[in-house]
Image (cartoon, helix red, strand yellow):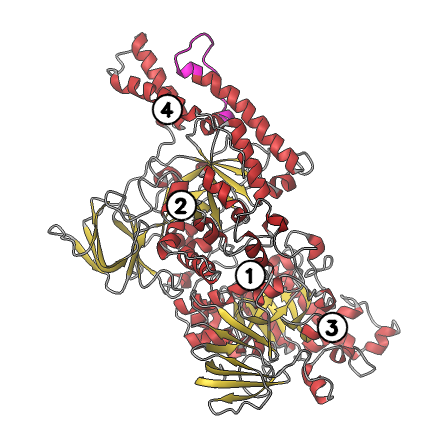
Amino acid sequence: MAKRRPRSRMASLLLAVFMASGCASGGNPPASGPGDSVTGEADRAEADRQLLNGTPNGAWESSYEPLASNPVLIRGGTIMTAAGEEIEGGDVLLVDGRIKSVGVGLDAPAGTAVIEADGRFVTPGIIDTHSHLGVYPSPSVEGMGEGNEATNPVTAEVWAEHGVWPQDPGFWRALAGGVTTLQSLPGSANLIGGRGVTLKLVPGRGATDMMFPGAPMGLKMACGENPKRVYASRGPSTRMGNVAGYREAFIRADKYRERWDEWLAGDRRADRPDRDLELETLAEVLRGNILIQNHCYRADDMLTMLELSHEFGFSIRSFHHATEAYKIRDRLAEENVGASVWVDWWGFKMEALDGIPQNLALLTEAGARAILHTDSGLEIQILNQNAARAMFAGRSAGIDVTRDQALRWITINAAWALGIDEETGSLEAGKAGDVVVWSGDPFSVYSRADQVFIDGAVVYDRSRTEGNPSSDFELGILPEAGQGGGR
Amino acid sequence: MSGPAKSPVRTARWSILLALLAGTPALAGGQDLAVTGGDVHTVSGGVLEGATVLVRDGIIVAVGRDVEVPAGVPTLDATGRVVTPGLFDATTSLGLVEVGMVSSTVDAQLQGDPVRAAFDVVDGINPRSVLIPVNRAAGLTTALSAPGGGLIAGQAAIIDLAGSSVGEMVVESRAAMVASFSAGAAGGARGGASLRLREVLDDARFWRENQAAFSEGRTRELSASRLDLEALAPVLDGETPLVVGVHRASDIEAVLRIAGEYGLDLVISGGEEAWMVADRIAAAGVPVILKPLTNSPGGFDRLGSRFDNATLLDRAGVDVVIGSFTSHNARWLVLEAGNAVRFGLPWDVALRAVTLAPARALGVADRYGSLEPGKVGNLVVWTGDPLELSTRAEAVVIRGAVTSLDHRQLELFRRYRELDVERPAFKGSGF
């Protein structure tokens, strides 16, 4: 029922440009000194490549280092792979931080630690596509809110990673709920709120220590009520104004991208373009290297954003909140746009009025990319329970949702939305050793995460009283709080 | 509804019990029903397997295995099912809020002075709120519909989630006085909150003893309006509970002191750090309404927030009440209770915390919260363990009437169940 417009493939054209510049830097001998024109050109190409990567001079690169790990065999559990059927009495072997194999009766190399999982359940590490941990940390008090640069409706130039506080106590609570990876996003005050960052839940002293290596960055965009409320007095104050704002920004970005792409392709007729942080981000979106994560509730708003994406030839990776995604699930499936949604939040504002608990089930049935997200420091700790609630809500309405499909909402589908599905999100040989061992069925309210592995290392173990990550903030601040394991 | 009797406050209450004694229709909407064959969790008297709950005119008259169902009483077969009292959420503003950010649909908060004791939510309750059937379908039968904001937010009502008029729904108007103790509640400092609270309680006491002089203008000026002071009289009598939102352990102790000084019937709400002063709360006999899924040090008044708060309080002998602390999703009450069990609360205590415990805390345990003769026939038939995620409410009975489980969200679902038509707007009901 929808009209289709062929999407331009600027991304593929630019990929060729990257590869060319990448090869140039890799294939040339090391710089021999200033004045060498060939090397100077190569250096410049490398510098240009780093600009596109968001890592000029190698700055802002991930400095994440996996924890040291020994081989581990998780033996005899119910293995929920997010890649097919559950395996009863199955094993998962982790070697060198990776999943070596998944199956029944696996042999383990000598010296492998064995975790008996009889009666327990094993899943991939859980992933949340929509978190504000780090940028809206606890305590939520003066001086701590970093999520919304609400000074201008378009702030594509700001990056969440520059606001992430690695000491947010919420990270370690999420970890104890089985979460291994999350995307921390700017807020939704702005039409274009800035770049999001994907983090691994391993403690670090700075945000780059937690950055998921190789994960593409996200761009937070917001539809509807929030921007028009925040900017009511100066504009945009209507949905019309919102859309004009996106278009104006992408028109500028496209021009910027074109100038830079000519330069990157070796066209030296003009001077090297000046850098513009805002347009740098948007040009990367147009090239397909930054994934759009679009806060958008209403079906008609989402359709409007799809039109916008056609106008400028980019794709939206995932709508977020998307309380009305079920109304356009066919379109989302056709355009391969994800929907990151809650189970049953609704009614807190007009654009959230039509949220229904069958949203995920209907999206899944339609073949759309269905993702369960939280936007909450609390609910990120019960993503497994929320997946169960959405699964049962679907089933009781007559939609046959499988356990594997429900698990995918919080694992591999979320990984896809973040562009890291080759690396994590399912229990398959070769992937990162991001694994959770649950005390029982993760779709029961009574189950708890017993062990959480990230890159093959136990980062959280419920049975230990010392050695689980905690925030500096919570040290010595409340003498009684250290007692017991209920936090 | 008010009369010439001595206390306008007390006569203004709508009390089912009084109505019963007066011989007026027993219970609005009250019906006959026999729920047979279920595993009945009475909450007050253990579990009766394969038992019958017999409701006449909306009131439970018998619970047991050998209950005879009189001819003409409709039956609901609950064989193989779990039967519990209807869920009771003491932490909602149901009927007072429709769309959170649309202020014209929110009647839970009076602006202005931090003391709004006279504010009574009842006339703002909308029986046709779409939130009511959404939450009822998940097993919620009774709720405290409460105001918020300020130091003393006003007076909350207990409602049953059935009926087409406020009069039919209201179980008890002015069921609780709602307050909040925090730095922000009055003047920007905790001392300001306690100062203002004591001042207004002192003045309410003064007003009660000097009403005539006050009316004639022969008293000093008082710190609140006549209506506010009058509204506080039953709170001073210990007749109406004072539900105080309070979080930090030392704040809880301050509120306990004030309640002790004035002889108030205190209920703590929120209570993130209550576990740290559990013994003192238990000694004072004060119940705590809490949200088990709370463990973030979200502010400096709740650094001790932890998932096993309910467990620790229960072990110390405190009456634990579980609340959802929302209106749109009061249906999360069972999720909250299940998570309390996950963190150590005994299962039967968790069930009591969403049924009998709120009724007790709010002074209606004579009529609500358990399945026993004499109580209102509010119950739920569940497909399994009511706290488990896979379970759903199969039947929700209010005052003996089987309620509809349909609601707006299901209408939306049905309209969009198939996308085989170009224009879903032509599907389903309309004008």
- CA–CA distance in space, label 1 to label 2: 25 Å
| Same chain assignment for discs 4 and 2 | yes
Mark 4 closeness class: few <14, some 14–19, many ≥20 residues within 10 Å: some
Please name the amino acid that badge 4 sits on: Leu
* Camera-nearest label, 1 or 4: 4
Q: State the residue position of label 4.
A: A15
Alpha-carbon span between mark 1 and mark 4: 47 Å
The reply to whether discs 3 and 4 touch (Cβ–Cβ < 8 Å) is no
Pointer 4 or 2: first along the chain: 4
Query: Image quarter for residue A57?
Result: top left
Q: Which residue occupies 59% across, 26% down? A: A248
**Foreground disc of the pair 2, 3:** 2
Secondary structure of the magenta portion, mostly? loop
Query: What is the C-alpha distance between the residues marked 3 and 1?
Result: 30 Å
State which region is magenta.
Answer: A262-279
Identify the residue position indicated by label 1 in the image: B329
Where is mark 3, residue-wise? B231
Residue under mark 4: which chain is it in? A
* Residue B156 x %, y %: 67, 69
Q: Which of B156 and A396 is in front in this view?
A: A396
Secondary structure under tag 2 reads: helix
